[in-house]
Amino acid sequence: MEKSSFPKVLVISHNVFSKTSNMGKTMTQFLGEWEKESLAQLYFHSEIPNVDLCDRYCRITDFDILKSFAKTKANATYLTKADADLEIKNTRIDKGIKSYIYRFGRNKTPFLYLLRNSLWNQKKWKSNELMNWIDEFNPELIFYPAGDYCFSMNIVINICKEKKIPLVTFFGDDYYFLDVNRKSIFDKINKKMYRRTFNQLMSYTSFYITASDKMFEVYKKEFGGNGCVLLTPSPKTSNPVNKLQSKISYIGNLGLNRYKALIEIGRVLKKTGFLLDVYSAETDKNILNNLTIDNGIKFHGVASAKDVQNIIASSILLIHAESMDEVNKEKTKYSMSTKISEYLNSGICIFAYGPDDIASIEYLKHNDIACVVTTQEDLEKYILKALNDEGFRKKYIENASKLAEKRHSYKANTTKFYEIIEAAVKNYKVGHVYENSSS
């Protein structure tokens, strides 16, 4: 990307830049051509980067916040590119009891949401050291990949107001309209708090980006048209096609009951003489104990970015799976998996299994870029066809390649992202961009 200058962007996010985790990869793809000197990241998880993207990092974790109650402010950890480890498979660095606590926290019960937000909202994160670190970098804009916690939104709003700089927000998942399990008083408190904070965030957002067309439709209606859809760019280079393709592979997150959909696929594959090879950083034994040969699954653990390229190249089918249950359908309704963009240019056929009314399945089906199955009854029929009919697979591969060029172009999408950032900096006016009265 040949640009005369790159605005200085402070990325504030839950996860670090990465070539392995979902949000880490999305951020890395959007900012892959940015000047390192014009990029800094403040993040809130026990991770270290495994990609050479940035020279300046600040990490504040839940444990830093907890320890800060015995002192004035939380002690942040400041990293440079020298602290990045480009060889590690998993960016997570929490071990032992810390790892157990984080796994427990993944349950995301209403009380834990309320507790975590309350702890962070005490502003123990806001030390003179951190603010000096931000001042030294002197950002012109904040880029914020939004999550499902209020506290990070509050941090973003606070820094935007104090430094008088614009904000561009990215929504990879929707939590504003998500309305499941609102049964307890904690559910109701969390939802009210989230929507109130979200609307404050949007009032400071100069421009927003959504990860799917379906999400943009509802956000445009609720928050106005000062945004766009920008799909995750496909990798700059395609994976080489391995003539010894023999694997059926799933690579990615097993949460939100995706593992149950994989078990359904695995049981069908086992009847055909195949196994489903699953690669994931998942450590929950309640999930892993079900990923067995008896269920047609061979679990391999986490794969490095380099390993992923080889796995894809040696596969005959690449699996995308989503849960069929109503609660998780609601949670994934507007989301778009980062794996889809990775698969499009691979030269390998995508096989998708999930409900027909969520964004990722709709996208695959509408564009005819994957063999899509939306009912368990049809699984065996279409798995057999996809395995045995090369022409059937070839149609989807060709369509996927064309769509990758049209909507997932690395050059076009990183250029578009640059233009969004540049315009937000150039046109910024101090204060609220627009007001929202929704609650």
Image (cartoon, helix red, strand yellow):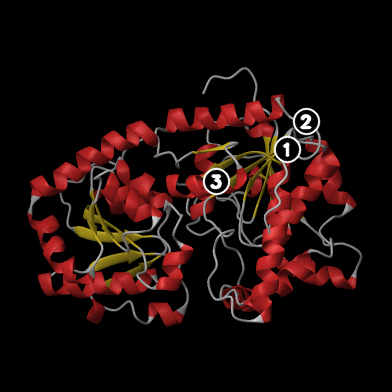
First-in-chain label (3 vs 1) = 3
Q: Where in the figure is residue 148, as x and y percent of width and height?
A: 61, 61
- According to the picture, the residue beneath numbered tag 3 turns out to be 221
- According to the picture, the residue beneath numbered tag 1 turns out to be 433
Q: Is residue 89 visible?
A: yes
- According to the picture, the residue beneath numbered tag 2 turns out to be 429
Element under disc 1: loop
Q: Is residue 304 above or below residue 39?
A: below
C-beta proximity under 8 Å, tags 1 and 2? yes
- In this rendering, would 68 be left or right of 263? right
Residue at horizontal 55 percent and vertical 46 percent from the top:
221
Q: Where in the figure is residue 438, as x and y percent of width and height?
A: 67, 54
Q: Where in the figure is residue 302, as x and y percent of width and height?
A: 42, 63
Q: Which mark is residue 25?
A: none
Answer with the quarter of the image where residue 321 lies: bottom left
Element under disc 3: helix
Residue at horizontal 33 percent and vertical 32 percent from the top:
405
Q: Is residue 270 above or below residue 289?
A: above
Q: Residue furthest top?
A: 4
Q: Nearer the viewer, mark 3 or mark 2?
A: 3
Residue at horizontal 51 percent and vertical 49 percent from the top:
218
| Residue type for callout 2 | Lys
| Residue type for callout 3 | Lys
